[in-house]
Image (cartoon, rainbow, N blue to C red):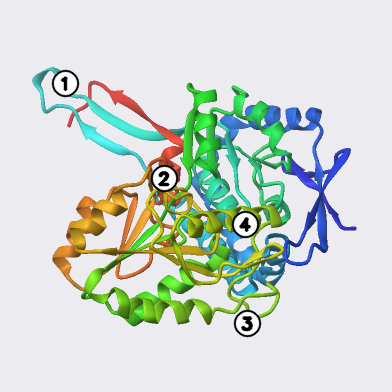
Amino acid sequence: MDVRPFWLAGKAATGEAEITVTNPYDDRVVGAAAVPTPEQVEQAVAAADAVRRTAAALPVHARAEALAHVSRRIAERAAEFAELISAENGKPILWARGEVSRAVSTFRFAAEETRRIGGEIIRLDTEPAAEGRVAYVARQPYGPVLGITPFNFPLNLVAHKVAPAIAVGAPVIIKPAPATPLSALLLGELLAETALPEGMFSILPLPNDRAAALVEDPRLPVVSFTGSAAVGYAIAERVPRKHVTLELGGNAAAVVLADADLDRAASRIALYSNYQAGQSCIAVQRVLVQDEVYDDFVSRLVPAVEALVTGDPADERTQVGPMVSEQAARRVEEWVNEAVAAGGRLLAGGGRDGATFAPTVLADVPDDARIVCEEVFGPVLTLRRVASADEAFAVVNDSRYGLQAGVFTTNVATAFRAAKELEVGGVIIGDVPSYRADQMPYGGVKDSGVGREGLRSAMEDYTYPRTTVFTGLTL
Protein backbone atom coordinates (compact mmCIF):
# COMPACT_ATOMS: atom_id res chain seq x y z
CA MET A 1 0.00 0.00 0.00
CA ASP A 2 1.20 3.50 -0.86
CA VAL A 3 2.16 5.27 2.39
CA ARG A 4 2.75 8.96 1.84
CA PRO A 5 5.29 10.67 4.08
CA PHE A 6 4.33 13.74 6.04
CA TRP A 7 6.27 16.99 5.87
CA LEU A 8 8.43 17.94 8.83
CA ALA A 9 10.06 21.37 8.56
CA GLY A 10 9.97 21.09 4.78
CA LYS A 11 11.36 17.57 4.55
CA ALA A 12 9.61 14.25 3.96
CA ALA A 13 9.42 12.05 7.06
CA THR A 14 7.78 8.89 8.30
CA GLY A 15 6.58 7.98 11.78
CA GLU A 16 5.62 4.84 13.66
CA ALA A 17 1.92 4.77 12.69
CA GLU A 18 -0.28 5.25 9.65
CA ILE A 19 -3.75 6.57 8.77
CA THR A 20 -5.45 4.39 6.17
CA VAL A 21 -7.58 6.37 3.72
CA THR A 22 -10.56 4.75 2.00
CA ASN A 23 -12.90 5.89 -0.74
CA PRO A 24 -16.31 6.52 0.88
CA TYR A 25 -18.15 5.34 -2.24
CA ASP A 26 -16.88 1.76 -2.29
CA ASP A 27 -14.58 1.50 0.77
CA ARG A 28 -11.55 0.63 -1.35
CA VAL A 29 -8.22 1.64 0.16
CA VAL A 30 -6.84 4.74 -1.55
CA GLY A 31 -3.58 4.95 0.34
CA ALA A 32 -2.15 5.78 3.72
CA ALA A 33 -0.50 8.70 5.44
CA ALA A 34 2.40 8.39 7.86
CA VAL A 35 1.58 9.82 11.30
CA PRO A 36 4.24 11.79 13.19
CA THR A 37 5.28 10.82 16.68
CA PRO A 38 4.96 13.33 19.53
CA GLU A 39 8.70 13.94 19.25
CA GLN A 40 8.36 14.75 15.55
CA VAL A 41 5.48 17.14 16.23
CA GLU A 42 7.71 18.91 18.73
CA GLN A 43 10.46 19.15 16.09
CA ALA A 44 7.99 20.74 13.65
CA VAL A 45 6.85 23.35 16.17
CA ALA A 46 10.42 24.09 17.28
CA ALA A 47 11.48 24.54 13.64
CA ALA A 48 8.60 26.94 12.95
CA ASP A 49 9.49 28.93 16.04
CA ALA A 50 13.19 29.00 15.16
CA VAL A 51 12.60 30.29 11.61
CA ARG A 52 9.94 32.89 12.42
CA ARG A 53 12.27 35.93 12.24
CA THR A 54 13.97 34.68 9.08
CA ALA A 55 10.53 34.08 7.55
CA ALA A 56 9.32 37.58 8.44
CA ALA A 57 12.44 39.05 6.82
CA LEU A 58 12.10 37.12 3.55
CA PRO A 59 12.14 39.51 0.59
CA VAL A 60 8.80 40.00 -1.10
CA HIS A 61 10.09 38.56 -4.38
CA ALA A 62 11.16 35.32 -2.65
CA ARG A 63 7.73 34.79 -1.09
CA ALA A 64 5.90 35.71 -4.28
CA GLU A 65 7.99 33.40 -6.46
CA ALA A 66 7.50 30.46 -4.09
CA LEU A 67 3.73 30.96 -4.27
CA ALA A 68 3.77 31.37 -8.04
CA HIS A 69 5.81 28.17 -8.36
CA VAL A 70 3.24 26.21 -6.37
CA SER A 71 0.44 27.64 -8.50
CA ARG A 72 2.18 26.58 -11.71
CA ARG A 73 2.98 23.11 -10.39
CA ILE A 74 -0.58 22.43 -9.23
CA ALA A 75 -1.74 23.31 -12.74
CA GLU A 76 0.84 20.94 -14.24
CA ARG A 77 -0.30 18.09 -11.97
CA ALA A 78 -3.99 18.99 -12.04
CA ALA A 79 -5.22 15.57 -13.18
CA GLU A 80 -3.28 13.83 -10.40
CA PHE A 81 -4.65 16.18 -7.76
CA ALA A 82 -8.23 15.84 -9.01
CA GLU A 83 -8.13 12.06 -9.03
CA LEU A 84 -6.68 11.99 -5.52
CA ILE A 85 -9.29 14.43 -4.16
CA SER A 86 -12.08 12.39 -5.72
CA ALA A 87 -10.71 9.13 -4.39
CA GLU A 88 -10.11 10.16 -0.78
CA ASN A 89 -13.10 12.48 -0.42
CA GLY A 90 -15.72 10.82 -2.65
CA LYS A 91 -16.18 14.11 -4.50
CA PRO A 92 -17.31 13.68 -8.12
CA ILE A 93 -14.41 14.19 -10.48
CA LEU A 94 -16.08 17.23 -12.08
CA TRP A 95 -16.13 19.02 -8.71
CA ALA A 96 -12.63 17.80 -7.86
CA ARG A 97 -11.30 19.40 -11.03
CA GLY A 98 -12.99 22.64 -10.01
CA GLU A 99 -11.30 22.50 -6.61
CA VAL A 100 -7.89 22.05 -8.24
CA SER A 101 -8.53 25.00 -10.53
CA ARG A 102 -9.41 27.11 -7.51
CA ALA A 103 -6.22 26.08 -5.72
CA VAL A 104 -4.21 27.20 -8.75
CA SER A 105 -5.90 30.58 -8.52
CA THR A 106 -5.53 30.76 -4.73
CA PHE A 107 -1.75 30.50 -4.89
CA ARG A 108 -1.61 32.85 -7.88
CA PHE A 109 -3.72 35.46 -6.08
CA ALA A 110 -1.45 35.11 -3.03
CA ALA A 111 1.64 35.73 -5.16
CA GLU A 112 0.01 38.83 -6.62
CA GLU A 113 -1.06 40.16 -3.22
CA THR A 114 2.42 39.55 -1.85
CA ARG A 115 3.86 41.90 -4.45
CA ARG A 116 1.30 44.52 -3.44
CA ILE A 117 2.32 44.47 0.21
CA GLY A 118 3.36 47.92 1.29
CA GLY A 119 3.23 50.30 4.18
CA GLU A 120 1.30 53.51 4.70
CA ILE A 121 2.85 56.94 5.31
CA ILE A 122 0.86 59.28 7.57
CA ARG A 123 1.88 62.89 8.01
CA LEU A 124 1.44 63.84 11.64
CA ASP A 125 1.96 67.60 11.36
CA THR A 126 -1.77 68.19 11.25
CA GLU A 127 -1.22 69.41 14.80
CA PRO A 128 1.47 71.91 15.86
CA ALA A 129 2.95 69.51 18.42
CA ALA A 130 3.73 66.95 15.70
CA GLU A 131 5.60 69.18 13.26
CA GLY A 132 8.42 67.28 11.57
CA ARG A 133 6.91 63.89 12.33
CA VAL A 134 5.80 61.14 9.98
CA ALA A 135 4.36 57.74 10.84
CA TYR A 136 5.10 54.65 8.77
CA VAL A 137 2.61 51.82 9.32
CA ALA A 138 3.50 48.32 8.09
CA ARG A 139 1.95 44.96 8.88
CA GLN A 140 4.05 42.33 10.64
CA PRO A 141 3.25 38.62 11.10
CA TYR A 142 2.21 37.52 14.58
CA GLY A 143 4.37 34.43 14.09
CA PRO A 144 3.81 30.79 13.12
CA VAL A 145 0.29 29.81 12.03
CA LEU A 146 -1.47 26.57 12.94
CA GLY A 147 -3.98 25.73 10.21
CA ILE A 148 -6.60 23.06 10.94
CA THR A 149 -8.53 22.04 7.84
CA PRO A 150 -11.68 19.94 7.15
CA PHE A 151 -12.37 17.06 4.79
CA ASN A 152 -14.72 18.73 2.33
CA PHE A 153 -12.13 20.71 0.33
CA PRO A 154 -8.92 18.81 1.12
CA LEU A 155 -6.75 20.87 -1.24
CA ASN A 156 -8.20 24.35 -1.55
CA LEU A 157 -8.95 24.92 2.13
CA VAL A 158 -5.36 23.90 2.90
CA ALA A 159 -4.29 26.41 0.25
CA HIS A 160 -6.28 29.10 2.06
CA LYS A 161 -4.17 28.55 5.19
CA VAL A 162 -0.77 28.01 3.56
CA ALA A 163 -0.77 30.69 0.86
CA PRO A 164 -1.52 33.76 3.02
CA ALA A 165 0.93 32.58 5.68
CA ILE A 166 3.77 32.36 3.18
CA ALA A 167 2.67 35.66 1.66
CA VAL A 168 3.16 37.54 4.95
CA GLY A 169 6.29 35.66 5.99
CA ALA A 170 4.78 33.41 8.65
CA PRO A 171 5.76 29.74 9.10
CA VAL A 172 2.74 27.44 8.89
CA ILE A 173 1.86 24.04 10.30
CA ILE A 174 -1.12 22.25 8.75
CA LYS A 175 -3.16 19.57 10.48
CA PRO A 176 -5.37 18.15 7.71
CA ALA A 177 -8.55 16.20 8.38
CA PRO A 178 -7.73 12.56 9.20
CA ALA A 179 -10.24 11.37 6.58
CA THR A 180 -8.55 13.27 3.73
CA PRO A 181 -4.84 13.96 4.38
CA LEU A 182 -3.45 12.81 1.03
CA SER A 183 -4.16 15.93 -1.03
CA ALA A 184 -2.41 18.10 1.55
CA LEU A 185 0.62 15.80 1.52
CA LEU A 186 0.80 15.98 -2.27
CA LEU A 187 0.75 19.77 -1.97
CA GLY A 188 3.70 19.43 0.41
CA GLU A 189 5.73 17.95 -2.45
CA LEU A 190 5.31 21.18 -4.39
CA LEU A 191 6.11 23.40 -1.41
CA ALA A 192 9.30 21.37 -0.88
CA GLU A 193 10.43 22.28 -4.40
CA THR A 194 10.64 25.98 -3.49
CA ALA A 195 13.53 27.88 -1.90
CA LEU A 196 11.56 28.59 1.28
CA PRO A 197 13.72 28.24 4.40
CA GLU A 198 13.71 25.04 6.44
CA GLY A 199 10.91 25.13 9.00
CA MET A 200 8.68 27.35 6.88
CA PHE A 201 6.05 24.62 6.54
CA SER A 202 5.06 21.31 8.07
CA ILE A 203 2.07 19.11 7.20
CA LEU A 204 1.21 16.76 10.05
CA PRO A 205 -1.60 14.19 9.62
CA LEU A 206 -2.71 13.66 13.20
CA PRO A 207 -5.79 12.13 14.79
CA ASN A 208 -8.11 14.84 16.07
CA ASP A 209 -7.48 13.85 19.67
CA ARG A 210 -3.85 14.95 19.28
CA ALA A 211 -4.70 18.45 18.05
CA ALA A 212 -5.16 20.03 21.49
CA ALA A 213 -1.44 20.13 22.26
CA LEU A 214 -0.76 22.01 19.01
CA VAL A 215 -3.63 24.42 19.64
CA GLU A 216 -2.30 25.22 23.12
CA ASP A 217 1.37 25.53 22.18
CA PRO A 218 2.43 29.15 22.86
CA ARG A 219 4.92 29.07 19.98
CA LEU A 220 1.98 29.01 17.54
CA PRO A 221 0.32 32.39 18.21
CA VAL A 222 -2.22 32.14 15.35
CA VAL A 223 -4.79 29.37 15.02
CA SER A 224 -6.82 29.30 11.81
CA PHE A 225 -9.60 26.71 11.98
CA THR A 226 -12.21 25.64 9.43
CA GLY A 227 -14.86 23.24 10.66
CA SER A 228 -17.82 22.92 12.99
CA ALA A 229 -18.97 25.72 15.30
CA ALA A 230 -18.77 23.48 18.37
CA VAL A 231 -15.11 22.64 17.79
CA GLY A 232 -14.19 26.14 16.63
CA TYR A 233 -15.55 27.96 19.65
CA ALA A 234 -14.05 25.32 21.95
CA ILE A 235 -10.67 26.19 20.45
CA ALA A 236 -11.25 29.92 20.97
CA GLU A 237 -12.23 29.35 24.59
CA ARG A 238 -9.21 27.13 25.15
CA VAL A 239 -6.68 29.74 23.99
CA PRO A 240 -8.18 33.18 24.74
CA ARG A 241 -4.81 34.94 24.41
CA LYS A 242 -4.13 33.68 20.90
CA HIS A 243 -5.23 35.21 17.62
CA VAL A 244 -7.89 32.74 16.50
CA THR A 245 -9.73 32.89 13.17
CA LEU A 246 -12.75 30.65 12.66
CA GLU A 247 -14.53 29.73 9.44
CA LEU A 248 -17.42 27.71 10.77
CA GLY A 249 -20.76 26.32 9.70
CA GLY A 250 -23.70 27.80 7.91
CA ASN A 251 -27.40 27.33 7.28
CA ALA A 252 -27.45 28.95 3.88
CA ALA A 253 -30.71 30.37 2.61
CA ALA A 254 -31.75 31.15 -0.94
CA VAL A 255 -34.58 33.65 -1.35
CA VAL A 256 -36.68 33.41 -4.53
CA LEU A 257 -38.85 36.49 -5.04
CA ALA A 258 -41.73 36.92 -7.45
CA ASP A 259 -39.67 38.85 -10.02
CA ALA A 260 -36.95 36.17 -10.23
CA ASP A 261 -36.05 34.08 -13.26
CA LEU A 262 -37.61 30.86 -11.95
CA ASP A 263 -35.87 28.52 -14.39
CA ARG A 264 -32.45 29.84 -13.41
CA ALA A 265 -33.29 29.83 -9.72
CA ALA A 266 -34.56 26.24 -9.85
CA SER A 267 -31.57 24.88 -11.75
CA ARG A 268 -29.00 26.69 -9.60
CA ILE A 269 -30.66 25.75 -6.31
CA ALA A 270 -31.10 22.12 -7.37
CA LEU A 271 -27.43 21.79 -8.23
CA TYR A 272 -25.97 23.78 -5.35
CA SER A 273 -28.01 22.20 -2.60
CA ASN A 274 -26.40 18.91 -3.66
CA TYR A 275 -22.91 19.74 -4.94
CA GLN A 276 -20.21 18.15 -2.79
CA ALA A 277 -23.12 15.97 -1.53
CA GLY A 278 -24.26 19.06 0.35
CA GLN A 279 -21.03 18.99 2.37
CA SER A 280 -20.26 22.67 1.97
CA CYS A 281 -20.83 25.44 4.50
CA ILE A 282 -22.61 27.44 1.81
CA ALA A 283 -24.60 24.67 0.14
CA VAL A 284 -28.24 25.74 -0.20
CA GLN A 285 -30.21 24.42 2.77
CA ARG A 286 -33.24 26.70 3.22
CA VAL A 287 -35.23 27.94 0.23
CA LEU A 288 -37.68 30.77 0.88
CA VAL A 289 -40.09 31.34 -2.00
CA GLN A 290 -42.56 34.19 -2.38
CA ASP A 291 -46.08 32.80 -2.20
CA GLU A 292 -47.33 33.97 -5.61
CA VAL A 293 -44.64 31.95 -7.46
CA TYR A 294 -44.19 29.12 -4.95
CA ASP A 295 -46.12 26.40 -6.80
CA ASP A 296 -44.61 27.36 -10.15
CA PHE A 297 -41.11 27.31 -8.67
CA VAL A 298 -41.58 23.93 -6.95
CA SER A 299 -42.82 22.41 -10.20
CA ARG A 300 -39.47 23.37 -11.74
CA LEU A 301 -37.24 22.62 -8.75
CA VAL A 302 -38.28 19.04 -7.96
CA PRO A 303 -37.67 17.67 -11.50
CA ALA A 304 -34.31 19.49 -11.56
CA VAL A 305 -33.30 17.77 -8.31
CA GLU A 306 -34.51 14.38 -9.48
CA ALA A 307 -32.55 14.76 -12.72
CA LEU A 308 -29.20 15.06 -10.92
CA VAL A 309 -26.90 12.11 -11.60
CA THR A 310 -25.91 10.31 -8.41
CA GLY A 311 -23.29 7.59 -8.30
CA ASP A 312 -19.62 6.73 -8.69
CA PRO A 313 -17.53 9.88 -8.15
CA ALA A 314 -15.02 8.67 -10.75
CA ASP A 315 -17.74 8.72 -13.43
CA GLU A 316 -17.60 11.85 -15.59
CA ARG A 317 -21.43 12.08 -15.52
CA THR A 318 -21.82 12.01 -11.73
CA GLN A 319 -22.97 15.24 -10.12
CA VAL A 320 -23.71 13.96 -6.61
CA GLY A 321 -21.38 11.48 -4.95
CA PRO A 322 -21.29 9.89 -1.51
CA MET A 323 -20.96 11.68 1.77
CA VAL A 324 -17.65 11.37 3.57
CA SER A 325 -18.81 8.29 5.50
CA GLU A 326 -21.79 6.05 6.07
CA GLN A 327 -22.03 7.49 9.58
CA ALA A 328 -22.49 10.97 8.12
CA ALA A 329 -25.19 9.70 5.74
CA ARG A 330 -26.99 7.93 8.61
CA ARG A 331 -27.10 11.22 10.53
CA VAL A 332 -28.73 13.00 7.57
CA GLU A 333 -31.18 10.13 7.21
CA GLU A 334 -32.12 10.49 10.87
CA TRP A 335 -32.72 14.24 10.49
CA VAL A 336 -34.88 13.74 7.38
CA ASN A 337 -36.96 11.07 9.12
CA GLU A 338 -37.41 13.38 12.12
CA ALA A 339 -38.62 16.17 9.83
CA VAL A 340 -41.14 13.90 8.09
CA ALA A 341 -42.39 12.54 11.42
CA ALA A 342 -42.93 16.14 12.56
CA GLY A 343 -45.16 16.91 9.57
CA GLY A 344 -42.74 17.66 6.76
CA ARG A 345 -43.57 16.45 3.25
CA LEU A 346 -40.97 14.57 1.23
CA LEU A 347 -41.08 15.83 -2.36
CA ALA A 348 -37.94 14.10 -3.62
CA GLY A 349 -35.22 11.77 -2.40
CA GLY A 350 -34.98 10.67 1.20
CA GLY A 351 -33.24 7.35 0.57
CA ARG A 352 -29.79 6.18 1.61
CA ASP A 353 -27.47 3.57 0.11
CA GLY A 354 -24.38 3.18 2.28
CA ALA A 355 -22.62 6.56 2.35
CA THR A 356 -24.74 7.91 -0.52
CA PHE A 357 -27.82 9.94 0.35
CA ALA A 358 -30.26 10.81 -2.44
CA PRO A 359 -30.77 14.51 -3.25
CA THR A 360 -33.74 15.43 -1.09
CA VAL A 361 -36.44 18.11 -1.07
CA LEU A 362 -38.69 18.70 1.96
CA ALA A 363 -41.63 21.07 2.38
CA ASP A 364 -43.73 22.20 5.35
CA VAL A 365 -41.05 21.30 7.88
CA PRO A 366 -41.58 22.83 11.35
CA ASP A 367 -39.24 25.71 12.13
CA ASP A 368 -37.80 23.94 15.16
CA ALA A 369 -36.73 20.80 13.29
CA ARG A 370 -32.99 20.19 13.31
CA ILE A 371 -32.91 20.08 9.53
CA VAL A 372 -34.14 23.69 9.51
CA CYS A 373 -32.29 25.09 12.53
CA GLU A 374 -28.92 23.39 12.29
CA GLU A 375 -26.40 22.84 9.52
CA VAL A 376 -27.45 19.65 7.74
CA PHE A 377 -24.18 19.31 5.79
CA GLY A 378 -25.82 16.88 3.40
CA PRO A 379 -27.81 16.88 0.12
CA VAL A 380 -31.07 18.18 1.56
CA LEU A 381 -33.06 21.40 1.10
CA THR A 382 -36.23 22.60 2.78
CA LEU A 383 -38.89 24.78 1.14
CA ARG A 384 -40.87 27.52 2.85
CA ARG A 385 -43.50 29.96 1.57
CA VAL A 386 -43.07 33.64 2.41
CA ALA A 387 -45.45 36.51 1.73
CA SER A 388 -42.84 39.14 0.89
CA ALA A 389 -39.20 40.16 0.90
CA ASP A 390 -39.76 41.49 4.42
CA GLU A 391 -40.75 38.05 5.68
CA ALA A 392 -38.03 36.31 3.70
CA PHE A 393 -35.28 38.53 5.11
CA ALA A 394 -36.61 38.08 8.64
CA VAL A 395 -36.54 34.28 8.22
CA VAL A 396 -32.99 34.37 6.85
CA ASN A 397 -31.89 36.32 9.91
CA ASP A 398 -33.75 34.04 12.31
CA SER A 399 -30.77 31.70 12.55
CA ARG A 400 -27.78 31.40 14.79
CA TYR A 401 -25.67 31.14 11.63
CA GLY A 402 -24.75 33.94 9.26
CA LEU A 403 -22.34 32.84 6.56
CA GLN A 404 -23.87 33.66 3.15
CA ALA A 405 -27.31 34.08 1.58
CA GLY A 406 -28.54 34.22 -2.01
CA VAL A 407 -31.35 36.42 -3.28
CA PHE A 408 -32.97 35.83 -6.67
CA THR A 409 -34.44 39.17 -7.69
CA THR A 410 -34.19 41.59 -10.61
CA ASN A 411 -35.16 44.59 -8.50
CA VAL A 412 -32.15 46.78 -7.74
CA ALA A 413 -33.78 48.38 -4.70
CA THR A 414 -34.53 44.95 -3.23
CA ALA A 415 -30.95 43.87 -3.89
CA PHE A 416 -29.62 46.87 -1.96
CA ARG A 417 -32.06 46.14 0.86
CA ALA A 418 -30.75 42.59 1.05
CA ALA A 419 -27.17 43.82 1.18
CA LYS A 420 -28.09 46.12 4.06
CA GLU A 421 -30.46 43.93 6.08
CA LEU A 422 -29.25 40.34 5.83
CA GLU A 423 -27.11 39.36 8.81
CA VAL A 424 -24.54 37.32 6.93
CA GLY A 425 -20.96 37.68 5.79
CA GLY A 426 -21.84 37.56 2.10
CA VAL A 427 -24.98 38.37 0.07
CA ILE A 428 -25.12 36.92 -3.45
CA ILE A 429 -27.66 38.67 -5.68
CA GLY A 430 -29.12 36.69 -8.56
CA ASP A 431 -27.51 33.43 -7.54
CA VAL A 432 -27.16 30.80 -4.83
CA PRO A 433 -25.30 31.49 -1.56
CA SER A 434 -22.78 28.85 -2.65
CA TYR A 435 -20.84 31.30 -4.83
CA ARG A 436 -17.33 32.03 -3.62
CA ALA A 437 -14.43 33.74 -5.38
CA ASP A 438 -11.15 32.94 -3.68
CA GLN A 439 -9.82 36.50 -3.81
CA MET A 440 -12.83 38.06 -2.05
CA PRO A 441 -13.32 38.29 1.74
CA TYR A 442 -15.12 35.15 2.91
CA GLY A 443 -16.49 34.42 6.36
CA GLY A 444 -19.50 34.91 8.55
CA VAL A 445 -21.10 36.41 11.61
CA LYS A 446 -22.88 34.93 14.62
CA ASP A 447 -22.04 31.22 14.94
CA SER A 448 -20.50 31.16 11.48
CA GLY A 449 -17.20 32.42 12.81
CA VAL A 450 -14.79 35.32 13.15
CA GLY A 451 -12.16 36.62 10.75
CA ARG A 452 -12.06 36.31 6.99
CA GLU A 453 -10.46 34.12 4.37
CA GLY A 454 -9.68 35.28 0.86
CA LEU A 455 -6.05 36.09 0.30
CA ARG A 456 -5.73 39.73 1.27
CA SER A 457 -8.21 39.33 4.13
CA ALA A 458 -6.35 36.33 5.56
CA MET A 459 -3.03 38.14 5.18
CA GLU A 460 -4.44 40.93 7.33
CA ASP A 461 -5.74 38.36 9.85
CA TYR A 462 -2.28 36.81 10.20
CA THR A 463 -0.58 40.18 10.82
CA TYR A 464 -0.75 43.25 13.04
CA PRO A 465 0.05 46.91 12.22
CA ARG A 466 3.37 48.19 13.54
CA THR A 467 3.75 51.95 13.61
CA THR A 468 7.13 53.69 13.37
CA VAL A 469 7.31 57.43 13.95
CA PHE A 470 10.12 59.46 12.36
CA THR A 471 11.01 62.73 14.05
CA GLY A 472 12.77 65.93 12.99
CA LEU A 473 11.95 65.71 9.29
CA THR A 474 11.45 68.54 6.83
CA LEU A 475 8.10 67.92 5.24
Q: Mark yes or no: residue 57 visible.
A: no
- C-alpha distance separating marks 3 and 1: 68 Å
Is residue 163 positioned above or below 76 on the image? above
Q: Secondary structure at mark 4?
A: loop
Q: Position of residue 442 (x, y in %)?
A: 41, 51
Marks 4, 1: nearer the viewer:
4
User: Within 10 angstroms of label 3, few (less than 14), some, or many (20 or more) residues?
Assistant: some
The residue that label 2 is drawn on is 452
The residue that label 4 is drawn on is 155
- C-alpha distance separating marks 3 and 4: 22 Å
The residue that label 1 is drawn on is 130
Would residue 219 be found to the left or right of residue 265 on screen?
Answer: right
Is residue 230 positioned above or below 456 on the image? above
Q: Are marks 2 and 3 in contact (CB under 8 Å)?
A: no
Looking at the rendered structure, the kind of residue marked 2 is Arg
Camera-side residue of 363 and 410: 363
User: Within 10 angstroms of label 1, few (less than 14), some, or many (20 or more) residues?
Assistant: few
Looking at the rendered structure, the kind of residue marked 1 is Ala
Camera-side residue of 463 and 438: 438
Looking at the rendered structure, the kind of residue marked 4 is Leu
Marks 2, 3: nearer the viewer:
3
Q: Secondary structure at mark 3?
A: loop
Would residue 321 be found to the left or right of residue 406 on screen?
Answer: right
Q: Secondary structure at mark 2?
A: loop
**Label located before the other in sequence (4 or 2):** 4
Camera-side residue of 144 and 4: 4
Looking at the rendered structure, the kind of residue marked 3 is Arg
